Image: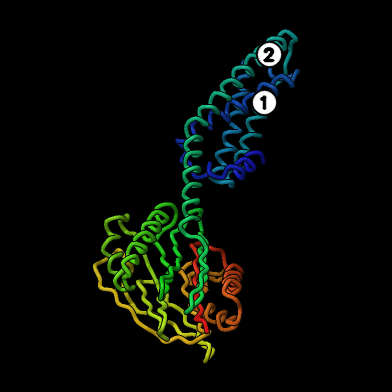
Amino acid sequence: MYFWLFLRRYPFFRTLPLRELRDLFLAFFFSWSVFGFLVHLLMFDHFPSQAAGLLWAVFVGSLSLLYFVATLKDVRLIPAVGLLQLGIFFLLFRPLPTLDVLKQKITVDVFGIGIVTLLGFNYFGSFINTSGLEQIKLRSELALAQAIQQTLVPPVHCRTARCEVYGKSIPSEKVGGDLVEAMAADRSLLAYVADVSGHGIPAGVLMGMVKTAVRVCLLSDQRPAAFLDALNRVLPGVKEEGMYVTLACLRFDAGTAEVEYALAGHPSILHYRRQTGDTRRLGTYQLPLGILPAKYNTARVGASAGDIFAIVSDGFTELTNLMDEEFGLSRIEELLERNAGRQLPELFDVILAEATRYGKQRDDQTLLLARVKD
């Protein structure tokens, strides 16, 4: 039970290779071997040899180490360790004949307790200053990366004369690779969702690069097709091999009833039409960014007051339930149609709650909603 509670409180020990746990193993061995000497002392009428205290110390220390390794790697081994414990105990059990041997036994055990206690603390300190310290550094770096993530990908909620946009990204780990953003200019608004392949810090770093690159492109008022071309040229030189980025964007321009959109390997954009009460999927097959040289194009669709556009990441669409069935776009379409009258933050919460009930999150979940205003 002690080992199980220890590992629940410090789960990162399960992720360390055995060679990095050497000092921790020795610390456990020597700290628990103290109880071997105590057992020897308590059994006044057994174990005649002075060396029996050392044998008990080795026995208890080794036993604790076996329990720890079994709990760390495979709890099914614990019953086998318990049987080994009982067998060795019965082999060691002997009567003690004289009082003189008892005095010698106490002396040996007292010295043994002092020595193994010092050794146990020494190896605990060694572990803390090596593998333990390294884990603290990694956790500190991860906390910093998480803080940067929250700065780079805050919830989005903005309004222009043409539309209202709300979006949020929920990472599956402390650092995610999804990006949601909306940027308004004098007469236009660009909203997009980007999804970097992979998880963790590498995906989060590339996500930050993508956001910076998009903003630089938009400073020169580039249209969606132009900044997608630029991103596709830049990404191969700054990403790890095998990584790529999918992206879907919407551009709302004042004075026009059309919305410009583009996709690069991303799930289809959903367009709920208020006048008909149905939902269309907007999609153009184009390669994800950062894989191969490509020329990207955009398309346009008419939009009326009350229409809603939704961009989701595959953290929603590929979410599976216990039957291994995907959440998909169809369920999101149904939720849009049933809840189109809600405020956008409420609509977001409805979709997220339904996804949470459907299955366990395994990937970053990002959703951007945009409603055309009257």
Q: Nearer the viewer, residue 309 or 141?
A: 309
Q: Nearer the viewer, residue 242 or 7?
A: 242
State the residue lying farthest toward the front: 186
| Sequence-first disc among 1 and 2 | 1
Which residue is located at x 57 percent, y 74 percent? 344
How many C-alpha atoms fall within 10 Å of the one at disc 2: few (<14), some, or many (≥20)?
A: many
State the residue lying farthest toward the left: 293
Q: Nearer the viewer, mark 1 or mark 2?
A: 1
Q: Which label belongs to residue 35? A: 1
Q: CA distance from mark 1 to mark 2?
A: 15 Å
Q: Is residue 230 shown left or right of residue 358?
A: left
State the residue lying farthest toward the bottom: 276
Which residue is located at x 46 percent, y 40 percent? 17
Please indicate, yes or no, whether residue 358 appears anywhere in the rendered image. no
What amino acid is labelled 1 in the image? Phe
Q: Which label belongs to residue 322? A: none
State the count of labels. 2
Q: Position of residue 216 (x, y in %)?
A: 33, 62
What amino acid is labelled 2 in the image? Lys
Q: Which label belongs to residue 105? A: 2
Q: Is residue 218 shown left or right of residue 280?
A: left
Up/down of 270 relative to 353, above or below: below
Q: Position of residue 367 (x, y in %)?
A: 50, 70
Which residue is located at x 34 percent, y 59 percent? 243
